[in-house]
Each structure stands twice: as C-alpha cells, then as structure tokens.
Amino acid sequence: MPANLPPQYFEAEARYRLTANPREKIEILREMLGIMPHHKGTDKLQADLRARISKLNKEMQKKHTKRRHTYHINKEGVAQLVLLGLANTGKSQILKALTNATPEVASYPFTTNAPIIGMMEFKNIQIQLVDTPAINHDFMLKWLSDIVRPADILLFVVDLSRTGFQPVSNYAVRQASSLSTITERLEKIKIIIETFIPPEPSIEYVFKKAIIIGNKIDLPHVNENFDKLKNKYPNIPIIAISAERKTGLQELKNKIYQSLNIIRVYTKAPGEKPDMNEPIVLPKGSRVIDAARDIHKDFVGELKYARLWGSNKFDGQMVERDYILKEGDVIEFHL
C-alpha cells in the first residue's frame, strides 16, 4: 500500500534536515508523525520516526547527565559542617583560619567555585569543614544540595560590616535579607533550618542545625550590628569573629562542639593508664554498653560490668551497662 504522504510532510522533512538542534529535530519528527496518514503503508515509516525520536531523547539525556556536576564528599572526622553565605562574607578566610586548607582568599566575589575541604582540630578530635560557592539573590548551584543534605551543621556566614558590597545602613534589614536569601534558596531544595517552621511540613524536608557566624568584628561600628543580628535570630547560635585577625575562633570552635551534641569518653585496661589522645566519640545520652559496642560488637554480649573514672562519685566505682556517660569519662570494661 502506498504511503500517500501530503506536501506538508515533505516540508517538515526539509526543515528536519536543515536543523542541528536535537530538541527541534524531535519536535519536527513528532510533527511529521502527526501529518502522515496512519495505515499499513506507513507502518514502517512510523516505526522509523519513533526510533529516531527515541535515539535523540537518549542522546539528549546522556549529554544532560554528563553536564550535571554532582559532588559526594566522604565524611571525615567526627562531623561534617558546611559553610554557606553570600559573596565576600569571608567564608574562605574562615576555612583558612580554622583548618589546614589553603583556599584562595581575595576581595573580589566568587573566588570559590567548587567545594573546598579542611579539617578543624578541636582538642583531640577532627571536624570536617566544607566551603562552598557563594549564594546570591538570583542563583544557587544545583549541586549544592549534594553537599548540604549530608552535613551535620550548616554555618551561615554574614559580613558584620556589609552585605555583598553595600555599605552599612539599615543593617538589620539588609542582614535579615542576606540570611533570608540563603534560607529561601535552601527551602527550594527542601532543606529547612530546625528553628524555622516550613510552610508545608513534609517527609521530603530535611531539617538542619545552623550556627550564624558574624565575621569582621574587628571593623569599626559593627558591635551594634552584631547585637541587632542576635535580636533578629534569638533561637540560632550566633558567634562574632574576625577570621583575618583570628579573634573569636576558640569560642566558635566551642560552640560548634556544643552544637554537635556529642561527648568524648576514654577507655583503659585494668592496671593501666588511659590513652587520653584517642577518645570514643558518642552522642550525648549514650550508655556504657554503647561505648562497648563502638569498640567491638562482641563486647555487648560479653560485658559483665565496667568501672568508671570521671563523672561518678567515686573513681573506679562499678557501674551498670546502662549507666549514662558524661564528657571525659574513663571506662574500664570487664568481660
């Protein structure tokens, strides 16, 4: 049976040959399918056009997948924290001041264009910090979600002297706008700060702890700005620092550790001194049996009792498996 194709089909076919855009090619092929008569004489041609559409769709999907940058950062240390902020707030300088990382630090914006990782020492543990490209009012990199979702705490960095390149004036409004920009961008990817109530709570949302870092406290006339910021966000921890002068960094480290809700405990063998350089890191509220499980799962069944030095009334006192551990406790397991 002859195909009997109308002139409009051949016109569309000519346009198909002239375009190199795969999306346009797909639209024209669909147009050609709609124009042609559908009978046994066009079955083979219909199948050919559908095969070409399928091939073009697969090629476009493949190119899209290659173009989309994704990042997976293996968590190291006891926790992973992500620095977020607008341009020129000093995120990279904070990373440099707190860790062994050497990011580029410059006065011009958007010097960070990929995640930069550093390890922050706190006493005898390591905490991972990840610097990220700046967020602005119009744009946030799509792959930032890959970095933010696994993080234990988000560190919002604000410039206490300005937002972006704007001078100090109407500070409270401008800084609130800066943080609102970040939180609104995060909300679009279903990430909510724990103290904020989402408009439509859903299991799709991920709730995150946050700390606000007010940077550049060394500059003139910023103490009042810092007080206004604290009043604006009373339910989020806020620390004032100067990354350049390295002031307030210890207070920031302490606040980070407190916010992680973890404790360090130590172990010792009978008759020996504990190794105070290698703590077991556990969530607050953990028990003796949890510390045993952290060392080896077989300890759970074999543990008879433990002796404790530290938070108990008497050093070396026998404690039960369910005893709640405190920061700095030393445990001696007896199997």
Image (tube, helix red, strand yellow):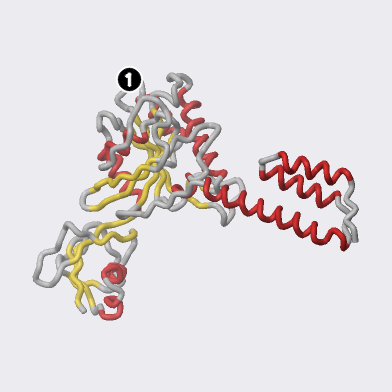
Q: Is residue 212 left or right of residue 207?
A: left
Percent coordinates x, y for residue 69 in the rendering: 49, 46
Task: Give the position of the C terminus as an image quadrant.
Answer: bottom left
On the question of residue 145 being in view, the answer is yes
Residue positioned 71% across, 57% down in the render: 51
Residue 211 in view of the camera: no
Spot the residue most to the front: 2
46 vs 102, left or right, is right
> Whole-percent x and y of residue 94?
32, 36
Q: Which residue is mark 1?
A: 220
Q: Quadrant of residue 255?
A: top left
The residue at the point 50 percent across, 32 percent down is 136
- Where, quadrant-wise, is the N terminus in this rendering? bottom right
Q: Is residue 281 left or right of residue 156?
A: left
Residue at image position (68%, 44%) is 23
For label 1, the crowd category at 10 Å Cα-Cα, with few meaning under 14, some 14 to 19 and many 20 or more, is few
